[in-house]
Amino acid sequence: MGLPFNIMPAGIDEVYGEDLSPEEITKSLAVRKVERIVEFFQGRVPPWICGADTVIFLDEKVLGKPLDRNDAASMLRKLQGREHQVVTSVALFNGREKIMDCRSVVSSVSFMAISEEEIEWYLNTGEWQEVAGAYKIQGLASCFISGIKGSYSGIVGLPMREFYVMLRENGYPYGS
């Protein structure tokens, strides 16, 4: 029987070097999340562990999680009326074989032009908290999205096709 999610270890510090690419940042954070879980289990590692991380990339800069409401407003102002990249990395650890696989998916999202009133409305929803780029495409911010290229599930935070391929290529026992 598996463990309930509510007893998993606390998260990691999401700190990274400024000289890293978005793919290097998300891969590093996804792997660190998995390593934190491995550490938590102290040698009794579950057979499969997955970690993922997402950042927004605009104007050669990474937009992570906003520090506060003002930071979120600033991010939304930068994104509005423009296209940006969403980079999500998935780390998969095979606990039986002690093998880590990590892959990245890059997608593009276009925001329509939005007014200050719309930004304030969205900030009042609270959806901007604890999410890269201060928005959730699967939430109310979807009304601001004028287009996407790439993996919708990757933009949400877990690119399902790529995750499935990783499981398959790493010997996940489907149907066993």
Image (cartoon, helix red, strand yellow):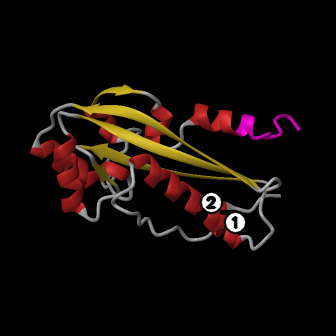
Q: Secondary structure at mark 2?
A: helix
Q: Is residue 8 left or right of residue 19?
A: right
Q: Amino acid at mark 2?
A: Val
At 15% from the left edge and 37% from the top edge, which residue is drawn?
Answer: 114
Q: Secondary structure at mark 1?
A: helix
Asked if the residues shown at circle 1 and circle 2 are in contact, with their CB atoms under 8 angstroms apart, the answer is yes
At 34% from the left edge and 38% from the top edge, which residue is drawn?
Answer: 85
The reply to whether the magenta stretch includes residue 42 is no
The reply to whether the magenta stretch includes residue 173 is yes
Q: Position of residue 127 (x, y in %)?
A: 34, 51
Q: Which residue is mark 2?
A: 34
Q: Is residue 138 left or right of residue 115?
A: right
Q: Residues within 10 Å of mark 1 (few under 14, many from 20)?
A: some
- Near-viewer residue (140 or 85): 85
- Near-viewer residue (117 or 162): 162
Considering the whole magenta stretch, tell me its main secondary structure. Answer: loop
* Up-down relation of residue 127 to residue 84 (above or below): below
At 58% from the left edge and 57% from the top edge, which residue is drawn?
Answer: 31
**For the magenta stretch, what is the residue range?**
167-176
At 54% from the left edge and 55% from the top edge, which residue is drawn?
Answer: 30
- Which of the 4 image quadrants contains residue 108? top left
Q: Residue furthest right?
A: 176
Q: Amino acid at mark 1?
A: Val
Label count reads 2
Label placed on residue 38: 1
Quadrant including the C terminus: top right
